[in-house]
Amino acid sequence: GLGLGLGLGLGLGLGLGSSGSAMDRHEQFLRRQQERHAKRKADAAAQDDGVDGDERSLTELVATFWSNFNAVLDPQLAALEGCDAAGAAARGETAAATAVLETAKKAVMDLQKQVSDAAIYLPGYDQRRGNEEIEKLSTLVETTRKQLQAKKKFSFRARRNKAKAAA
């Protein structure tokens, strides 16, 4: 008795009853689908840049990458080239140059992350070019760091020790 009642209840719940209720459900389905489509269109129009990521062309993505990349790279190169690390080390004023170095090191890491994130859409040539620019900045950072290090004073210790031993 219970199984038969459950079967009838399920049959009515699935729309196996009159054809009018099936048409109502179909109309409700179509209306909900249209509402969802309209909502998606409204959400897409409300985005900040107004362009969906899938709609952007490859050339736009590459151009955006290079403008962001150069916005980080150029100021760092200029700061390091303008930094008088050797003069600062000679005068004992290394604080400003050290700050420039730390900023440049962070920029190198940021640029490496940008290149790796853009590897999905960035052509191989642009990836190599970006990595070469990063390497150039990294080399400049290392050169400047070496200039800042205090140079060891030269002395004739070996001769002095031999002279003491001979006397």
Image (cartoon, rainbow, N blue to C red):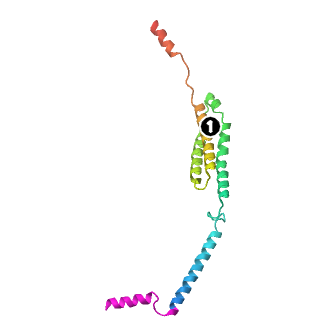
| Quarter-of-image position of residue 107 | top right
Q: Residue furthest top?
A: 167
As drawn, 122 above or below 95: below
Which element is circle 1 on?
A: helix
Residue occupied by mark 1: 140
Q: Nearer the viewer, residue 9 or 132?
A: 132
Give the residue drawn at x 59%, y 50%. 115
Give the residue drawn at x 51%, y 92%. 19
Residue 70 location (% of width, % of height)? 66, 48
Q: Report whether residue 45 is seen.
A: yes
Q: Residue furthest front?
A: 124
Tell me the chief SS of the magenta region: helix
Residue 17 location (% of width, % of height)? 46, 92
Q: Residue 142 colored magenta?
A: no
Stretch of the chain drawn in magenta:
1-20
Q: Nearer the viewer, residue 42 or 118?
A: 118
Q: Quadrant of the N terminus?
A: bottom left
Q: Is residue 132 left or right of residue 165?
A: right
Q: Residue 5 colored magenta?
A: yes
Q: Residue furthest left?
A: 1
As drawn, 12 above or below 138: below
Give the residue drawn at x 55%, y 24%. 152
Residue 65 location (% of width, % of height)? 64, 53
* Mark 1 Cα shell of 10 Å, populated few (<14), some (14-19), many (≥20): some
Residue 119 location (% of width, % of height)? 58, 53
> What amino acid does circle 1 point to?
Leu
| Quarter-of-image position of residue 23 | bottom right
Q: Report whether residue 99 is seen.
A: no
